Image (tube, helix red, strand yellow):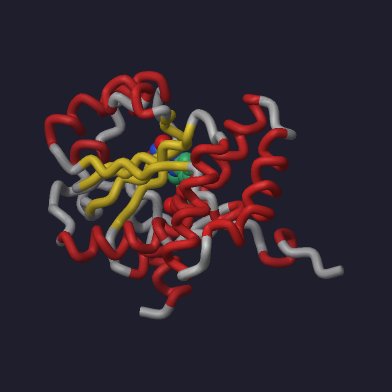
Amino acid sequence: MKLIEALEWRYAVKKMNGTKIPAEKLNQILEATRLAPSAFGLTPYTIIVVEDEETRKKLQPAFYNQSQVVDGSAVIVFAAWNNVTEKEVAEYMQDIAEQRGVAVETLNDFAGYINGSLKNLNADQARIWADKQAYIALGFGLVAAAAEQVDATPMEGFVPDAVDEVLGLKALGLHSTVALTLGYRDAANDYLVNAKKVRRDHKKLVINK
Ligand SMILES: Cc1cc2nc3c(=O)[nH]c(=O)nc-3n(C[C@H](O)[C@H](O)[C@H](O)COP(=O)(O)O)c2cc1C
């Protein structure tokens, strides 16, 4: 299936049918999220994969009882870091050094540049900045799911503190930012299954200068 066809096929499914996603498809979707770009390449978020049925049942009230949480196959929670400090930047430099086979000292200027930029942000700005990076990964996950013919519902309809509580995110220095429920559409019972996709016309959306 071509990319645009896959994107026309996908929609934010309201009713899923309980069918499990094959592990290799889930892994492909997660790999696409791992390949998402982020500012500086720092990836200031962690991806929580919840397949366990009991945990998804516990999560459902935190998602205003949205049925996809339990009728889907997995809930992916993109959890941004609460703080980005010099420690995380140093770990990232270590990753670059290892993966590119360069001495970590050659990255001192880059580390200094990142640390300097992050110090300009107050706590709220830093949190918003980390959240924005997580949304890019959500986008990659949505596209990958469509390419794999797996249904997906992006979700920010949840109570973040309640989700954090169920998943123990506070202790990990994380907060839930946005989620993606993966599964398969219940075509007989989803009122949106045949709904025409509504998007702003190209001429209104895109301005050529
Ligand atoms: C960030 C974000 C959060 C969303 N939250 C929810 C949600 O909590 N529950 C839901 O059913 N749909 C949710 N949606 C789905 C949107 O309503 C849907 O993507 C939009 O109406 C466009 O329709 P389509 O995705 O079916 O083409 C969300 C979408 C995005 C991008």
As drawn, 53 above or below 23: above
Q: Please tell me in which quarter of the rendered image ligand 1 is found.
A: top left
Measured as percent of width and height from the top left, residue 145 is found at: 34, 61
Compared across the picture, whether 182 is left or right of 127 comes to left
As drawn, 200 above or below 170: below
As drawn, 167 above or below 190: above
Q: How many marks?
A: 0
Q: Nearer the viewer, residue 5 or 126?
A: 126
Measured as percent of width and height from the top left, residue 95 is found at: 44, 57
The quarter in which the C terminus is drawn is bottom right
Compared across the picture, whether 154 is left or right of 90 comes to left
Q: Is residue 64 visible?
A: no
Measured as percent of width and height from the top left, residue 203 is found at: 73, 66
The quarter in which the N terminus is drawn is bottom left
Q: Nearer the viewer, residue 131 or 196?
A: 131
Which image quarter: residue 193?
Answer: bottom left
- The residue at 61%/34% (across/down) is 128
Q: Nearer the viewer, residue 190 or 121?
A: 121
As drawn, 46 above or below 23: above
Measured as percent of width and height from the top left, residue 160 is found at: 42, 25
- The residue at 39%/63% (across/down) is 32
Q: Nearer the viewer, residue 138 or 80?
A: 80
- The residue at 28%/28% (across/down) is 167
Which image quarter: residue 31?
Answer: bottom left
Residue sticking out furthest to the right: 209
Q: Is residue 147 visible?
A: yes
- The residue at 18%/30% (across/down) is 55
